[in-house]
Image (spheres, helix red, strand yellow):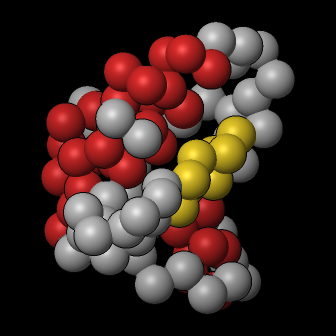
């Protein structure tokens, strides 16, 4: 029986996880460690991780990627200009 969220996501195929409860800098460090900077796309399915996703792309995303993509389910994040502040 799966009793924790971590067990559930691992059972569904997650290779790695990190805690959203960590300070942003620690989350970003974990993302960098887990991915080795080999990503150019982020999807925020929670609608609460826009800052984390954009910062992750800017700081730890694939520096050789011609284009980086960020998507969110957050329909109240209405200022697309703010994405430019993250360099993505």
Q: How far across and down, in percent of the image, does residue 65 sit? A: 37, 67
Question: What quarter of the picture does the C terminus occupy?
Answer: top left
Residue 5 appears left or right of 33: right
Q: How far across and down, in percent of the image, does residue 26 sit? A: 19, 43
Residue 30 visible in this rendered orientation of the protein:
no
Q: Is residue 13 above or below residue 35?
A: below
Q: How far across and down, in percent of the image, does residue 81 sit? A: 55, 16
Residue 50 appears left or right of 36: right
Q: How far across and down, in percent of the image, does residue 62 sit? A: 30, 67
Q: Quadrant of residue 38?
A: bottom left
Please count the marks in the image: 0
The front one of 84 and 70 is: 84
Q: Quadrant of residue 39?
A: bottom left
Going 63% across and 53% down the picture, which residue do you hit?
Answer: 43
Going 48% across and 55% down the picture, which residue do you hit?
Answer: 68
Residue furthest front in the image: 66
Q: Is residue 76 above or below residue 59?
A: above
The front one of 68 and 1 is: 68
């Amino acid at each position: 029986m799966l009793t924790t969220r971590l067990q559930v996501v691992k059972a569904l195929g997650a290779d790695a996880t990190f805690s959203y409860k960590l300070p942003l800098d620690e989350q970003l460090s974990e993302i960098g460690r887990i991915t080795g900077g080999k990503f150019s796309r982020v999807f925020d399915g929670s609608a609460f991780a826009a800052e984390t996703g954009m910062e992750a792309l800017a700081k730890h995303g694939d520096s050789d990627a011609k284009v980086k993509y960020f998507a969110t389910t957050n329909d109240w994040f209405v200022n697309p200009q703010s994405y430019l502040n993250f360099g993505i």
